[in-house]
Image: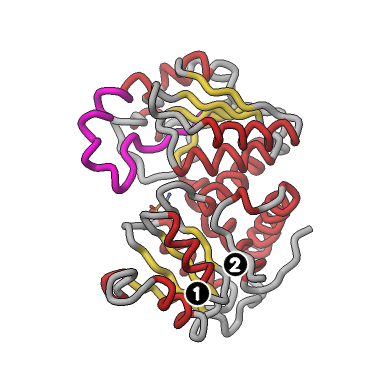
Amino acid sequence: MTSHFIALEDWSDAELRGLVTLAQSLKAEHFQGGNTPILAGKTLALVFEKPSLRTRVSYEIGMRQLGGNGLSLSPQEIGLGKRETVADISRVLSGYVDGIMARVFDHNTLLELAKYGSIPVINGLSDSHHPSQAIADALTLVEQLGDPAGKTLTYVGDGNNVARSLLIYAAVMGVNVRIAAPEGYHLTEDEMDLISERAERNGASFTPFIDPIEAVTGADVVYTDVWTSMGQEEETAQRLKVFPPYQLNLELMHHANPGSIIMHCLPAHRGEEITDAAADSQQSVLFPQAHNRLHAQKAVLAHLLGGVALT
Ligand code: CP
């Protein structure tokens, strides 16, 4: 059976931790002067239904650094689900390339690509999950906190795709995870149960809050994301009324632990979910976090396309 990186729920705790260990080793190798061409002769198709800076550049450059190639295909060009069915596109690409990385609206599109093709499918963001961001976040937590187990991370804002994947990955790393979101914008009960299970299995806890100050008190990491995700633009006006108390600003950070760090997956809507002062503060790790997309995703590529074992 082909393995895919579509949702973290499909991966065991040991595998997810193994990916972070592999990412650390690939990053060290890169900065020590060379990358082993694990993916020589391999090609990854990159399909984007939504805009991207980090995902597109980091997957394309990641393939190149490992000796392979990335081939970008716009949905207009290939007519994803319009000119041709997703199933047929996946069957065809399976004969040309060695993997598909796709950013899509509907998560089911990824499941269909995986069902009908015979090559690994990697989720570069869907409406419900963002595992490619979460593995970079896990690597960043390890770099910034040392062993992150026992530390506390609070996600403040919309219970979206980034929150869902981040909280699972951090829980697997033994981090106590919290979310502060307004009523109606939390994760579902099932999703919260899943995060709780992963946290408890790894000696940690999961706690949802409505009050952002309560949620941030005692946190070592405070993380936020945009209030209106791609595809929700018609909700912008309503969300701008609801979310201001959840802004990540220096006043909110006063409630976090001394030495706490600020994370954001970017792009940021500065002045909305995060202030300039917070994003550009000494506590901010936004850019090392963004740069880790490259190193973390290389672990996914090396494992799925290059057969590198996880330890
Ligand atoms: N964080 C993230 O996925 O960035 P892009 O949308 O630029 O790819």
Q: Position of residue 168 (x, y in %)?
A: 60, 40
Where is residue 37 drawn, in percent x and y? Answer: 64, 77
Residue occupying image coordinates x 51% and y 85%: 95
**Disc 1 beta carbon < 8 A from ligand 1?**
no
> Which of the two residues, 264 or 32, is positioned nearer the viewer here?
264
**What is the distance, in whole Å, between disc 2 and disc 1 at their CAs?**
9 Å
Magenta-span inclusion, residue 242: yes
- The amino acid sitting under disc 2 is Leu
Quarter in which the C terminus is drawn: bottom right
Q: Residue at x 29, y 73 (%)?
A: 79
Residue placed most toward the observer, 207 or 56:
207
* The image quarter in which residue 54 lies: bottom left
Magenta span: 222-243
Circles 2 and 1: CB distance less than 8 Å? yes
Q: Position of residue 142 (x, y in %)?
A: 66, 42
Residue 203: x and y in percent read 76, 30
Kind of residue at disc 1: Leu
- Seen from the viewer's position, the closer of residues 97 and 289 is 97
Residue sitting farthest toward the right:
311
**Circle 2 sits in a helix, a strand or a loop, which is it?**
helix
Q: Secondary structure at mark 1?
A: strand
Q: Which residue does the image show at 21% across and 40% down from the upper left?
A: 234
- Name the residue beneath numbered marker 2: 301
Please give left or right for residue 90 compared with residue 219 in the image: left
Residue pointed to by mark 1:
44
